[in-house]
Amino acid sequence: MLSADTNARITQVGPGTPAGELLRRYWMPVVPKAELDEVRMRPVRLLGEDLVAYKDDLGRYGLLAEQCPHRSASLRYGRIDGEGLRCPYHGWKFDLTGACLDQPAEPPGSTYKDSIQQTAYPVQEAGGLLFAYMGPAPAPLIPRYDVLAREDWERRIEIHPVLECNWVQPMENAVDPAHLYWLHGYTGGAPSASPDDSNEFEPFGLGIYKSHIEKNRTEAHPLVFPNILRGPGHVAHFRIPMDDTHTRIMYVLYNPTPDGSPVHQETVPYQYIGAVKEAYDDQGMARFRHHMKSFASQDAMAWETQGAVVDREKEHLAVSDKGIIMFRRMIEEQIIAVAEGQDPLGVLREPHDTINFYIKQIDLRSGDSISWPNQDKRSFALSVMDDHGPYRGSGQ
């Protein structure tokens, strides 16, 4: 179990909170680039802050605090005007750096606008997603993870329903393969799973590798710290903390080209997945089985019914929870690193090659096997560290 104070430290994401300051050291997905190209402007809630993402008339992407610094009207109802965004109330205009460019009702020659600075965050594109950095300058690089940077992979993006729970709950699930039989196998989602399966966990330079060994199948893939499940099945799950009690899930899915040739994908398509609500009620297991037909909805049920923020003082952890304990300690270690003025785990500041994660799936019944790259987890971790410097908390 965790004390209430420790639980708050790892779950609260607002400005000035320990985990909030940690998460602000990473680039966070905001919106698919193709969507902002279409709609030009949309509201965003991220790390406890209400923001507006927009594309100006010069083709640049920006992210501003929603409330205008003049009289606090919402910029989400504003209009894009040339190189900036105008407030709908009095027309104050801000560029993507937060500088105030115009105050129409002020006297001619007034320099008052030069003293106004709206909260603004830099935005960059990777893998068809627009990412924002909300931490202190200078910003690190967006890591060249394979799902974002491989040129021979064709991508698409899925945006799943907002989870009504804290971000740590879905991330703990990423290192909790003991649930596979009971939550997924028992409901028909993972028929090869068994309650006697074994699991192994290993920290590495970018997070935690988990190996799940079943009677008929084995797989290995990583949790990429702090909020990515780099799964098997050609997908990465981004668990994006909106605030303390809501989490946005985005998937980046990919298909490699058969011959390794580059893909000229001008637009990465995106899709909003329908809400998975009313998946459980007082009618019991019959309704549970009827509605919980996908892994995503089964997981959402488990995460949300734990509570908006799990009361971890009431837990009774067991041997099978080793991965969860490892992840919680990793959060705590990286909170300390940030408090000491260091970069946390996986923050990269030097140019680097594409980071190809070790992914393995073997079906012992059919003989089907997927392994990428052709190396083991340890050699991957060492090669990343050798190329890009040491990572605090890597276990090396």
Image (cartoon, rainbow, N blue to C red):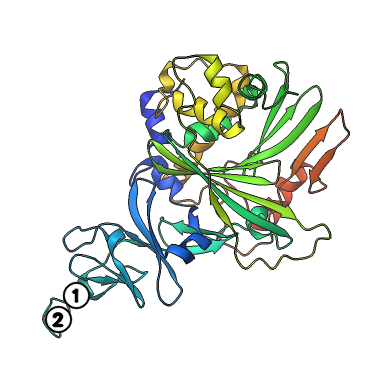
Choose top left, top right, bottom left or bottom right for residue 312. Answer: top left
Choose top left, top right, bottom left or bottom right for residue 19. Answer: top left
Residue at x 56%, y 61% (from the top left corner): 349
Front of the two marks 1 and 2? 1
Q: Is residue 150 left or right of residue 70?
A: right
Give the residue number, with chain letter if any, for mark 1.
103
Residue 384 spot, x, y in % from top left? 69, 52
Task: Give the residue at the far right of this rendering.
Answer: 367
Report crowding for label 2: few under 14, some 14 to 19, many 20 or more residues within 10 A (C-alpha): few
156 shown above or below 330: below
User: Which label belongs to residue 383?
Assistant: none
271 shown above or below 189: below
Report crowding for label 1: few under 14, some 14 to 19, many 20 or more residues within 10 A (C-alpha): many
User: Which label belongs to residue 110?
Assistant: 2
266, 370: nearer the viewer: 266
In the rendered image, is residue 174 in sight?
no
Task: Give the residue at the far left of this rendering.
Answer: 107
266 shown above or below 197: below
The mark total stands at: 2
322 shown above or below 269: above
